[in-house]
Image: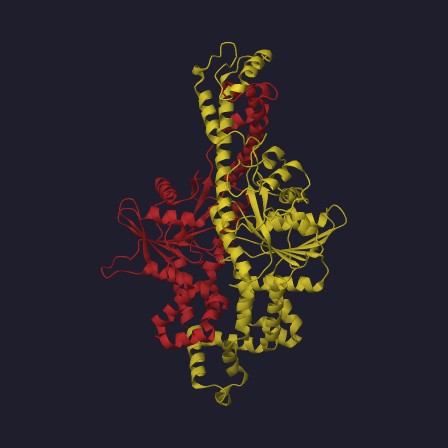
Chain colours: A yellow, B red
């Protein structure tokens, strides 16, 4: 996990979009970042250090490093002295292992090896377990076991559309209510639609509260002919249609389930509302996570708009896997041209190892020939060095192209949402395996990269 | 060649792109393919640079050689109303159900029903025939949910069939399951040469096998071109800095002396080579892991200029050349 800082702290070539030169200069001049309060640079440390920040929600498209970001943020906050719990939804095994926990489960487990006085706890959402706990907590044992044994309940809780999102929000509410942690960092489910986790509680809530429930409930509750006087003809037609569709036995299961759950419905709705309000509260900060790729940033823009519409507090955008180069002063075009020069060595007079070609850097020329002469203990540059150098230059050209593509993609986002603060995280060549790796990501997250650099000198 | 081609993969691996390229690749010589989207993200419309797809099969591309690609974004709610209409003539009652919240319930909360509707619609398109007796589509390509959910998504019919032991949903689920578990179907997994997606691919294959779902191919997406080979990378670790500085100077990039323009490039360039070497080793290792899974393996190149419509055709050509169609 070693990385060359040069490759990460240096930044993309200058470009000409909206330019706040004051900030760019500041970031260059100082190593501490807290002094900078650019609306466009997201300072992560002040956010996680602020005792008023109680919940950080990481959301974004799948595959952008959302869970890793959540874990790295949690670790960083803990090592800066806070008592943190990270709620992950579906972490890759390796990520769980990176926190020294082989199998995360529905109970927060303390992560060992944290520096400082803070604490890090981590857990993985177990939908079914969470749902079961709600049932157990809100009904007497007899009724609870009736619900838990119901086939409809079993498949509902085992994770079909919406349940995961609902349970994630439910768990968040529970963790917050326990008030044991200074900070809760939540990862959001890899939803089919990025916004399901905001919608699901409402949907489930309105379903459980809705007319449909009453219809389903009626026959099971009252039953037989006596029930008919409460049901108009339209409604019995409806249950008829449902019966047709679902099959009589499934409908019966649903009805039994609904009847057994009846007493809990109010609670569901209340908690769904409470969690929703909790998300809107000032102690909550949303971080939209993305990678500098078109689709991921498109989804991120969608998120930003949706969060604004729901009046959810957005702290900023975390842009993962941003590439940099320590040699950003050398453009892709010049690198390729230089590589070509090396591919055709005949042009160059190499008789005495002196390179006296006209360089584009004319001011450098005299120095150039002088040095080559002076240091010439080594044999004439052989072909393998030149080949390698040409390769290095091509590699650099690829890097520079990638860099400018990433920059263009990000600029498009910034143009749409100039109000969103951005924290860039330099790309790692490999994956995260341990706390050191997570710590490294945390450092990168908190390092404010000069977003619009002046030329590197 | 299976007629229902299901494309899954970890988020971020480009499964929508691969599904679209596959649909194009399969539409050779007058063949007709249907590209189906089930997650409501309108990824297909974005790829083909057209307006959002309605719940309607619509021609979106002509493949080289005259084949046609149709696309359909399945909306579970409309699919359910469709279904009700088709089997029960429930037109009015359907609307009433909607008002009651039953449709919303059925398509978002009800166990698996949504997934049955989505897979059911795709299977219907696979089986549909024209009056001439010819299949309406030679191939149906589905841009399916990600690897982590694919088995449950496809197997949901089994779960529903277990839950609804009788009745039309039960029958529908059974019929869909017969198609999905037959050689008519192949589930392909898209991955990158990175640890997490490869791990997820391996897990996904195991799950699919366990559920007796037919696994097709592994498609490695966004493979970077090899710029430096293993020998060169090894050499890069040992090469004297001054020699590289001199070469850079020879190439016309300034002075090789300490502090000279060429000399100042040496460290960053070697650092980039070091990162590349780390990635190279990792990719090599992951290729090995994928090779052990014993499935046909295809590689698609990373497109230097990012993904666009031209790139999509490029990938389709690549898939054809690799004999996927």
Can you see residue B157?
no
Q: Position of residue A74 (x, y in %)?
A: 67, 51
Residue toward you, A105 or A360 = A360
**Up-down relation of residue A172 to residue A343 (above or below):** below
Question: Which residue is depicted at the point 65% across and 36% down?
Answer: A29
| Residue B44 relative to residue A18: left or right | left
Residue toward you, B220 or A391 = A391
**Up-down relation of residue A217 to residue A410 (above or below):** below
Q: Position of residue A256 (x, y in %)?
A: 54, 77
Q: Residue furthest left?
A: B132
Residue toward you, B123 or A54 = A54
Can you see residue A361?
yes
Residue toward you, A456 or A265 = A456
| Residue A140 relative to residue B86: left or right | right
Q: Position of residue A320 (x, y in %)?
A: 56, 45
Q: Position of residue A65 (x, y in %)?
A: 57, 48
**Up-down relation of residue B309 to residue B115 (above or below):** above
Question: Which residue is depicted at the point 50% across and 44% down?
Answer: A411
Q: Quadrant of the N terminus of chain A?
A: top right
Question: Which of the 4 image quadrants contains residue B181?
Answer: bottom left
Q: Residue furthest right?
A: A117
| Residue B105 relative to residue B324: left or right | right
**Number of callouts in the render?**
0
Q: Quadrant of the C terminus of chain A?
A: top right
Question: Which residue is depicted at the point 51% across and 63% down?
Answer: A161
Question: Which of the 4 image quadrants contains residue A59?
Answer: bottom right
């Amino acid at each position: 996990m070693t990385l060359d800082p040069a490759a990460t702290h240096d930044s993309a070539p200058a470009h000409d979009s909206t330019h706040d030169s004051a900030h760019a200069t500041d970031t260059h001049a100082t190593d501490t970042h807290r002094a900078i309060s650019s609306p466009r640079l997201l300072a992560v440390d002040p956010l996680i250090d602020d005792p008023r920040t109680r919940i950080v929600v990481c959301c974004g498209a799948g595959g952008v490093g959302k869970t890793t970001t959540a874990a790295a943020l949690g670790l960083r906050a803990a090592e800066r002295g806070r008592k943190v719990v990270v709620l992950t939804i579906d972490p890759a095994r390796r990520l769980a292992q990176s926190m020294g926990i082989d199998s995360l489960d529905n109970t927060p487990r303390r992560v060992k090896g944290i520096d400082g006085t803070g604490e890090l706890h981590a857990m993985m959402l177990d939908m079914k377990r969470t749902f079961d706990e709600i049932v157990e907590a809100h009904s007497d044992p007899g009724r609870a076991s009736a619900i838990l044994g119901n086939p409809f309940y079993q498949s509902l809780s085992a994770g079909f559309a919406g349940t995961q999102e609902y349970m994630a929000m439910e768990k968040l509410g529970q963790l917050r209510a326990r008030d044991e942690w200074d900070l809760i960092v939540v990862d959001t489910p890899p939803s089919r639609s990025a916004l399901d986790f905001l919608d699901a509680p409402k949907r489930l809530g309105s379903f459980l509260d809705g007319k449909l429930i009453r219809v389903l409930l009626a026959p099971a509750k009252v039953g037989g002919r006596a029930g008919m006087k409460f049901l108009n003809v339209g409604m019995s037609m409806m249950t008829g249609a449902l019966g047709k569709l679902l099959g009589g036995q499934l409908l019966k299961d649903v009805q039994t389930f609904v009847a057994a759950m009846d007493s809990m419905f109010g609670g569901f709705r209340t908690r769904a509302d409470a969690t929703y309000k909790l998300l809107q509260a000032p102690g909550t900060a949303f971080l939209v996570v993305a990678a500098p790729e078109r689709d991921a940033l498109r989804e991120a823009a969608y998120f930003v708009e949706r969060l604004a519409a729901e009046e959810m507090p957005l702290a900023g955008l975390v842009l993962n896997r941003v590439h940099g180069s320590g040699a950003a002063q050398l453009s892709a075009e010049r690198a390729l041209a230089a590589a070509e020069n090396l591919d055709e060595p005949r042009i160059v007079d190499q008789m005495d190892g002196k390179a006296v070609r006209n360089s584009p850097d004319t001011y450098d020329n005299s120095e150039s020939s002088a040095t080559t002469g002076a240091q010439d203990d080594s044999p004439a540059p052989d072909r393998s060095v030149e080949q390698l150098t040409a390769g290095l230059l091509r590699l650099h050209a690829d890097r520079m192209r990638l860099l400018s593509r990433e920059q263009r993609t990000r600029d498009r986002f910034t143009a749409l949402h100039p109000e969103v603060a951005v924290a860039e995280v330099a790309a790692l060549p490999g994956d995260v395996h341990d706390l050191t790796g997570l710590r490294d990501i945390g450092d990168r997250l908190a390092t404010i990269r000069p977003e619009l650099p002046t030329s590197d000198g | 060649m299976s007629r229902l081609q299901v494309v899954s993969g970890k988020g971020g691996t480009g499964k929508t792109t691969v599904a679209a390229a596959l649909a194009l690749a399969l539409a050779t010589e007058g063949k007709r393919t249907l590209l189906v989207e089930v997650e409501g993200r309108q990824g297909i419309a974005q790829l083909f640079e057209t307006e959002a797809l309605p719940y309607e099969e619509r021609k979106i591309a002509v493949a080289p050689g005259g084949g046609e690609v149709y696309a359909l974004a399945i909306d579970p709610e409309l699919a359910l109303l469709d279904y009700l209409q088709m089997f029960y003539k429930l037109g009015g009652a359907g609307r009433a159900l909607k008002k009651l919240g039953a449709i919303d319930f059925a398509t978002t909360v009800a166990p698996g029903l949504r997934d049955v509707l989505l897979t059911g619609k795709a299977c219907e398109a696979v089986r549909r025939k024209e009056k001439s007796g010819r299949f309406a589509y030679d191939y149906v390509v589905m841009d399916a949910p990600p690897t982590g959910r694919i088995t449950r998504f496809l197997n949901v019919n089994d779960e529903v069939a277990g839950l609804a032991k009788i009745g039309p949903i039960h029958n529908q689920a059974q019929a869909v399951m017969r198609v999905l578990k037959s050689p008519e179907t192949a589930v392909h997994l898209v991955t990158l040469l990175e640890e997490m997606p490869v791990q997820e691919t391996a897990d996904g294959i195991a799950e699919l096998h366990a559920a007796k779902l037919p696994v097709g191919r592994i498609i490695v997406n966004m493979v970077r071109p090899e710029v430096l080979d293993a020998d060169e990378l090894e050499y890069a670790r040992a090469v004297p800095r001054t020699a590289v500085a001199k070469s850079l100077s020879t190439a016309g990039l300034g002075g090789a002396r300490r502090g000279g323009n060429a000399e100042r490039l040496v460290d960053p360039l070697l650092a980039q080579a070091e990162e590349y070497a780390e990635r190279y080793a990792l990719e090599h290792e992951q290729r090995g892991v994928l090779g052990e899974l014993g499935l046909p393996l295809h590689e698609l190149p990373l497109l230097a200029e990012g993904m666009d419509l031209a790139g999509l055709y490029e990938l389709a050509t690549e898939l054809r050349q690799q004999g996927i169609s």
